[in-house]
Image (cartoon, grey):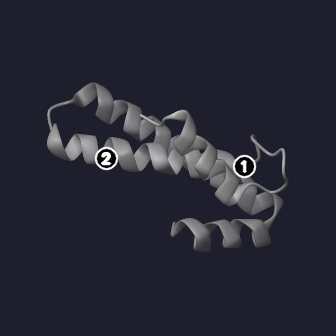
Amino acid sequence: MLTKTKKLKIVKDVQVHETDTGSPEVQIAIISRRIDELASHLKKNPKDNHSRRGLLQMVADRKTHMKYLEKKSPKRFNALNKKLGLKK
């Protein structure tokens, strides 16, 4: 689970402007961090199918946000991919 301080750190790393909390970049970064944490949980608990379903939903949600950002601004999309180390 992301704590408030972890989330603020993620937002500060990728925000577009000073008061940005909801841009696609921020949303993708937060979802990516939640995916990483849930993936590590599932490695320890392989039979947790409810969490696995949530993970798949988050991956689909991130993919939707990434498609939107790629369509709107390919330059910002590529910069975010480099920063987070994601692939299309």
- Image check: 67 left or right of 38? right
Whether residue 28 can be seen here: no
Q: Is residue 3 above or below residue 79?
A: above
Residue type of the residue flagged with mark 2: Ala
Q: Name the secondary structure under disc 2.
A: helix
Q: Label 1 is placed on what type of residue?
A: Pro
Residue wearing tag 2: 39
Residue with the most extreme top position: 50
Please name the residue shown 24% across and 29% down the image.
49
Which quarter of the rendered picture does the C terminus lie within?
Answer: bottom right
Name the residue located 16 percent from the left edge and 37 percent from the top edge: 45
Q: Is 20 drawn above or below residue 73 in the view shown?
A: above
Question: At x 70% / y 66%, what residue is drawn?
Answer: 77
Q: From the top left corner, tell me how far across and down residue 66 is, in percent.
A: 64, 55
Crowdedness near tag 2: few (<14), some (14–19) or many (≥20) residues, C-alpha within 10 Å = some
Q: Are marks 1 and 2 in contact (CB under 8 Å)?
A: no
Q: Nearer the viewer, residue 51 or 8?
A: 8
Closer to the camera in the image, 5 or 30: 5
Q: CA distance from mark 1 to mark 2?
A: 22 Å
Q: Nearer the viewer, residue 54 or 3?
A: 3
- The spot of residue 85 in percent (x, y) is 51, 70
Residue placed under numbered mark 1 in the picture: 24
